[in-house]
Amino acid sequence: MTNNLFKKKVLFILLFAISNFVQAQKSLVLWYDKPSGNVWERALPIGNGKIGAMVYGNVSQEILQLNETSVWTGSPNRNDNPDALASLPAVRKLVFDGKQKEAEILSEKTIQSKKSNGQIFQPVGSLNLRFANHENYTNYRRELNIERAISTTTYSVDGVQYTRTSFVSSPTNTLVVRITANKANSISLDAFFTTPQKNVKLSTNSRKQLILHGATAGHEGVEGNQLKFNALTTFKQQGGSITSNDTLTKITGANEVIIYVNIATNFNSYKDLSGNEIARTEADLQKALPKPYATLLNEHVANFQSFFNRVKLDLGSNPAAEQKPTDVRLDEFRTNNDPTFASLYFQYGRYLLISSSKIGGQPANLQGIWNNKMFPSWDSKYTININTQMNYWPAEKTNLSEMHEPLLKMVKELSETGQETARIMYGSRGWVAHHNTDLWRITGPVDRIFWGVWSMGGAWLCQHLWERYLYTGNKAYLAEIYPILKGASLFFVDDLVEDPRNKYLVINPGTSPENAPAAHQGSSFDAGVTMDNQIVFDMLSVTIRAAELLKKDQQLVDTLKTIRKRLSPMRIGQYNQVQEWMEDIDSPNDKHRHISHLYGLFPSNQISPYRTPELFVGANNTLIQRGDVSTGWSMGWKVNWWARMLDGNHAHLLIQNQLSPLGVNAAGGGTYPNLFDAHAPFQIDGNFGCTSGIAEMLVQSHDGAIHLLPALPDFWKEKGSISGLKTRGGFEIVKMTWTNGKVTSLQIKSTIGGNCRLRIGAALKGKNVNLQTAKGENSNPLFITEETAKPIISPKASIILASIPPTFLYDFTTEKGKVYTFDVQ
Ligand code: FUC
């Protein structure tokens, strides 16, 4: 090669690399042309599942607001009400007699926890960086690159360009901030901690480190001063000088500064606080400090991308919109077709899950891992009547199974603490959890009994254990989780009672999370509530299937099957809706944010256009009657429901409603400038719910087959592709492309073998596969769908059913590890 040719080739490669980089930058970056000021919901979240930080990007007064996953108030405790058992017969009788309000009043005293309503997830404090004389700046930009999990702030002062780069490294469990300038000796700053925590000591030491040591308080009678935390900030600077006084470290005239923040607690488990928070921060620091910055950064990016890069999504682009700052794009999204913004939001959900839920940390709570308030809304706990489950809807399908781990561990722990609750309060075997839990894995009913009476939290969470099995087919894992499933079912075996009105086996007292029918004098209490029936049905079904697969407990299987037959079926009511309550007392004007009786449509699969068409139409009517705009998480759930209704345009409308700045939706939620979901206030479930919904619009696998492009909206039809989504049965969509709403190419990997059944709108031709037209049940056991009892009244369902596009159904046999390629005919 001549020298010139070589140079040209290098130039070409460079240009290609740069254009790729710029492309990636544009589509997977949140960026702003103004600092956050004092607005937390403008700051940008970074985290590694243990340490979380909100980076404000302020120029002269920078704030990194800090969290650690186990910094909660209180200490090991329980909150059962032992009076429950004796009062249950009276409560049940009142409910069966139609005296729901009286039952609720009695239960407020006898079932409601008399102890704590759960503890609070709290902030550690903030690291403040003060830069003198930086008030007049130009060329400002701050961004969060969600493909690299790095936040960067750049600006110029007096002709010097400054760059701050922040990330939380998983390999070293350290928050790293690097400050550089393009002129020597330009970096001067004061660094100090502040904290809203009361029981703390701030200090510096001879190494010029900043130390924030403290203990959280007690709350609602639960002992405090037990959970200890330590935050340690360490500086490494080039050039200039470093000094410190009591609580402040000062750097003057440096060329570069690297800041390491380590945070740890003495928390080992919900019953053990014997860790050493000080030794832990020092040990983590020693993992980070010796490494050159480039190594730290590269290891961080590699670790993050080993999860993030598994899925790529292209929904089309709008180059004009892509040039604009993220807050402007958010403002315009509902009136502008900006498909890259939808894919950015989808990937942001995956970014947030990787950053807030990792092995060794706690599950993502109501705010993930980011909270600056001592008394955040709902204590930033785990509300397990929807919100915590929603956080994990994207985990398996968007190829982040590892991020599911902290939740699965929590379910195991609840199955331990919940045994005593089952025994003491209900006289039942097995275990139970109500509608909330916290770091200490409380399982008793909290808040007012109106909400707290619901006893399905554990059983719903068990569906996550089962779902992971359906995605992986891992029998050893199934054997591990089986005792937890069995325990949740045993609770129901003992707790279900016969309804004298109709002889069904029902949960009493039960409720449909947080709603109350007017006909019951506004009491939330009832028996045989639809969601209870659906969750019990799923719980018994998965236990039966798990026991059969593991060849265990035949007698129990027989019992569960007998009980399952006696559960009440779903019903279609007078407004052609799926009934929420046993009686037909729903109001078509009820706009309540919870639509719990559609649990059967999503996340469960009891309602299907192909298997239960009457219920499918009923669900459609229910969704229309409840309306679209609501709290953020409710809109996130609705994206999934409309995807399951196979209505991509309605799902997209909900995405537009959800991705509206707060205040646009009258009496509803929306999205903050940093793309955090707004209940309001910030609640992360909506982010995760919508991410799951977008995946459900592209690929579904709950209804006996892998359904490709089940709900593609007109906005994304023209051209697009998705790579890396997972499905039940251990399949991975290696890549699927589409044009004009039709799949144009497809590659599917089988990770465990078995029959693969595809449902698709266009005829397929296999390249290395023998496709058969599918008939009967899918022979792959990971796709079995359970027969639910049919509704009692059947409405005229034909109009909606006729609008469902026809599909082709194919079967082909797969081998473990092989990739199958298809063309569209
Ligand atoms: C449930 C919801 C509320 C809120 C809270 C954290 O109680 O009904 O809207 O999301 O959880």
Image (tube, rainbow, N blue to C red):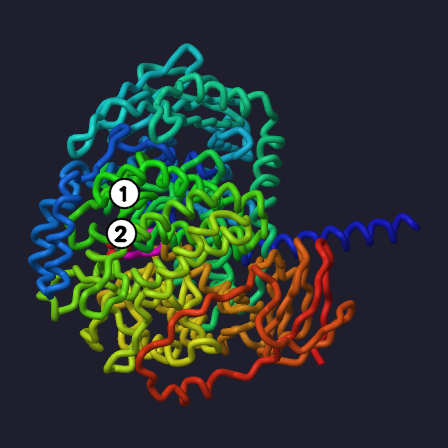
Q: Residue furthest right?
A: 1
* Vertical order, 487 against 751 (above or below): above
Q: Which residue is mark 2?
A: 495
Q: Is residue 801 left or right of residue 704?
A: left
Q: Confirm whether the magenta stretch covers residue 689.
A: no
For residue 84, what is the image quadrant?
A: top left
CA distance for labels 1 and 2: 9 Å
Q: Quadrant of residue 582?
A: bottom left
Which numbered mark, 1 or 2, is in the foreground of this view? 2
Residue contact between numbered discs 1 and 2, judged by CB atoms under 8 Å: yes
The residue wearing badge 1 is 422
Return the residue nearer the eye: 795 or 338. 795
Q: Measured from the top left, where is residue 21 in percent x and y?
A: 63, 52
Query: Three-letter amino acid code at disc 2?
Result: Asp
Q: Quadrant of ligand 1?
A: bottom left
Above-or-below relation of 738 to 507 = below
- Residue 400, percent from left and from top: 53, 49
For label 1, the crowd category at 10 Å Cα-Cα, with few meaning under 14, some 14 to 19 and many 20 or more, is many
Bounds of the magenta span?
677-683
Quarter holding the C terminus is bottom right
**Which is the main secondary structure of the residues drawn in magenta?**
loop
